[in-house]
Image: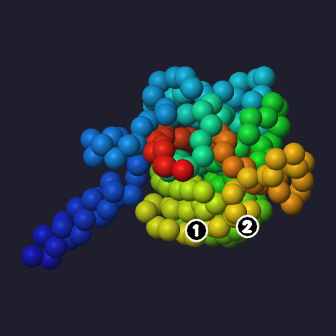
Amino acid sequence: MKRFATLLLALGILSITSILTAGELTEDMKKDGWISIFDGKTLDGWKANEKYEGFKVENGCIVGFGNKNHLYYMEELKNFELQLDIMTKKNCNSGVYVKSQWQDAAWPVTGFELQVNCSHGDPVKTGSLYNIIKIFKAPHEDDEWFTYHIICKRNTLECRVNGNVLYTYVDPMENGGVPQGEKITEHNKRISQKGHIALQQHDPAGIPQFKNIFIKKLPD
């Protein structure tokens, strides 16, 4: 009986694990409006903002390597949900940007960066909304897949990791955008009404991996 209970517990853990990872796009997700934006084979629809290579596709994953680079999904989005699986190696520092404007050869200065970092020296860990909300203990380990689920709607951003809601950030600018004609400054540089999703390759020490990248567009 004890062994049977242990087996049931193990099966339960496996079941929970399967729920907490993005996995394949299910028929129910398709009916609900989710689409895949990475085909697991090519970088079609994506573009790196540095001239040198910094991303490749291996074993169905987008893998970052080398110096600073950002891989943009080239469609601009306003209200949407993003779900993706990520794995870090030791000392990996990376990030997922949302609502960022395209910039050649530069760190994105608009939109929001959700940190990806378990063991890098930067004390700000996975789940943090960079420069806004700081989390100092990563909700995952290196060498294991975790799922980011990010919901951007109007002036709110909800962050979930492995199904757990970490926070809902409410942007102080009611319309979620820099006023027309106003310059981007240190005060407003993280604010963008709409923009791109981007994946970050931070430095040569880090090798982030991304897969199962899905979006669901939401009404205005």
Q: Quadrant of residue 74?
A: top right
Query: What is the spatial separation of the Cα atoms under label 1 and label 2, in whole angstroms?
Result: 13 Å
Q: Which mark is residue 172?
A: 2
Mark 1, secondary structure of its residue:
strand
Horizontal arrangement in the rendering, residue 215 relative to residue 113 (left or right): left
In-image side of 40 versus 191 (left or right): left
> What amino acid type is highlighted by mark number 2?
Pro
| In the depicted structure, whether residue 37 falls above or below residue 53 | below
> What residue sits 79% from the left and 52% below the top?
178
Disc 2 packing (10 Å; few <14; some 14–19; many ≥20): few
Looking at the image, residue 50 sits to the left or right of residue 181; the answer is left
Q: Position of residue 14 (x, y in %)?
A: 29, 58
Q: From this viewpoint, is residue 121 visible?
A: no
The residue singled out by tag 1 in the image is 168
Is 189 placed above or below 48 here?
below
Front in this rendered view, residue 50 or 76? 76
Quarter of the picture containing the N terminus is: bottom left
Please state the horizontal and vertical placement of residue 82, each as a whole percent of the image: 51, 48
Q: Can I make out residue 132 in this image? A: yes
Q: Position of residue 142 (x, y in %)?
A: 56, 54
